[in-house]
Amino acid sequence: MSTENLADRLGRIDDYVAHLFRSDDPALAEALAGMEENNLRRINISPNGGRLLYLLTRIAGARRVLEIGTLGGYSALWFARAVAPEGRVITLEADPRHARVARASIDRTELAGNVEVRSGDALGTMDAMIEGGEAPFDVIFIDANKDGYPRYLEAALQLSRPGTLILADNVIRDGEVIHPAAGEAEQRAVHQFNARLAEDPRLEAIILPTIGRGFVDGIALARVRPPS
Ligand code: SAH
Ligand code: DHB
Ligand code: MG
């Protein structure tokens, strides 16, 4: 057994996989550069996470993707690559500055026509989408404020069809979600979200552990079942 500590070993393994499957897509580099220039927090999905989203979207044969939480557009561009040239990504962002940075980065790429950034609180936008008959989506990715996850799941189900793939980032948070304390609203909400994924008869799901910067996180995968 290695004497290297676990965090270092995980980091090295994640780097190995990232290097093996690295992408030279200038669109993704644009998004990261745009985030850097505008001092956005680097809480985008990792390169390995992005490739996972991309592959799952390809496997699902998706044409319509909904993302909750845009930031600088990095994950949105992974989805756009997966659905191009015909498909469409709608990504929801509450912070108008983030939405502007993402739009500008996306507009510098060939994928500009495949992505729509909608500003505003995601739950309100999702309600309007349900009312406006914009369902169904083939893939829905939840990655905004963690205390909203249970409500985003309910809205996502209303924007789904049987077979829709619902994904969510940050569902482990180094194990903090397992036994959250009373005051930890985000951890408690994600704990509840995970329990619902496991229990809801409309879904079949699993959580894949992922490697963050020095900690373990997770991505949830759920498939919407046909009505029984
Ligand atoms: N998916 C992005 C990262 C998203 S970070 C990527 O991997 O590249 C989370 C984003 O959710 C932030 O930009 C934050 O402003 C946004 N957000 C937070 N609360 C929100 C809300 N209520 N509605 C929509 N977006 C929200
Ligand atoms: C945070 C949000 C994320 O979506 C993420 O992947 C990592 C961190 C955060 O709000 O701290
Ligand atoms: Mg995230």
Image (cartoon, rainbow, N blue to C red):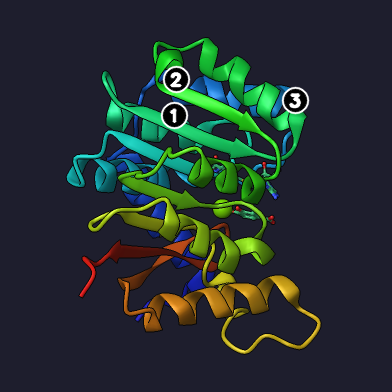
Cα distance, mark 2 to mark 1? 7 Å
Q: Quadrant of residue 100?
A: top right
The relative height of residue 159 versus residue 23 in the rendered view (above or below) is: below
- Asked if the residue under mark 1 is in contact with the one under mark 2, i.e. CB atoms within 8 Å, the reply is yes
Crowd around label 1: few <14 · some 14–19 · many ≥20 (10 Å): many
**Image quarter in which the N terminus is found:** bottom left
- The numbered mark, 1 or 3, whose residue comes first in the sequence reads 3
**Image quarter in which the C terminus is found:** bottom left
The relative height of residue 214 versus residue 39 in the rendered view (above or below) is: below
Crowd around label 2: few <14 · some 14–19 · many ≥20 (10 Å): many
Q: Which mark is residue 77?
A: 1
Q: Amino acid at mark 2?
A: Ala
Q: Amino acid at mark 1?
A: Leu
Q: Which residue is mark 2?
A: 27
Picture quadrant of ligand 2: bottom right
Q: Quadrant of residue 134?
A: top left
Q: Which residue is mark 3?
A: 38
